[in-house]
Amino acid sequence: MQIGVDIGGTFTDIVALGADGHLFLTKVPSTPKDLLEGIGDAVRRVLALAGAPASSVTRFIHGTTVATNAVLEQKGAVTAVLATEGFEDVLELGRQKRSRMYDLAMDPETPTFVAPRRRRIGIRERLDARGAVLVPLDEEQVKAAVARLRDDGVQAIAVSYLFSFVDPRPKRGPRDSCGRIPRESAFRSRRRSTRPFASTSASA
């Protein structure tokens, strides 16, 4: 038995393919607070339709439009970005691929709505490509930034320090200070990538 699930914002659709080639389809309401609940309901329902036990499942594939919808509808947690000082505008600059290269008045074509300029803060710290400390992390600045973001109602903080995948210790400053952010807040560190825009946008 092979199962495929598409988790949408309103419904979770599921299809099961039996060993004999028969298809079984159904859908259940999605459960935004815990998507796994909706997935579990869908799996139980489609297995019941197929008359098959859970042990018969040999392949399980899932995808979701939740993240895509969040981008298209510009919804989601109130997010801030802490970046290496001087790189706080990477989310807006992108890779410099523009549909109108010489139009200086055009709106950004990058996902700046995720963290507008007022919620992107440059932090004094710098590692080189080998992880050696060029500028020590300014922990007091981090604490002050987190406190300000908390007061502004921020619910999630993405940290994007240059070369932090080589030495993750500078990221612990924001993580320790995030205890002062409301409990429902999230914390994401940057991906292992040498390209600042890719890592910043993915973290945010």
Image (cartoon, rainbow, N blue to C red):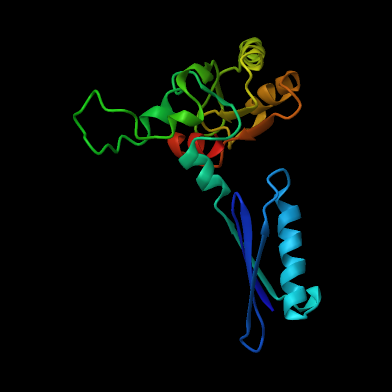
Tell me if 62 is positioned left or right of 176 in this view: left
Give the total number of marks visible in the rendering. 0
Give the image location of residue 145, x and y in percent.
Answer: 61, 14
**Which quadrant of the view contains residue 161?**
top right
User: Where's the N terminus, which quadrant?
Assistant: bottom right
**Which quadrant of the view contains residue 11?**
bottom right
**Which quadrant of the view contains residue 108?**
top left
Tell me if 172 is positioned left or right of 101 in this view: right
Towards the viewer: 101 or 23: 23
Q: Residue at x 25, y 39 (%)?
A: 99
Whether 13 is drawn above or below 70: the answer is below
Towards the viewer: 146 or 164: 146
User: Where's the C terminus, which quadrant?
Assistant: top right
Tell me if 81 is positioned left or right of 105 in this view: right
Give the image location of residue 199, x and y in percent.
Answer: 50, 38
Towards the viewer: 155 or 189: 155
Whether 31 is drawn above or below 19: the answer is above
Give the image location of residue 9, x and y in percent.
Answer: 60, 49
Whether 201 is drawn above or below 172: the answer is below
Towards the viewer: 83 or 179: 179
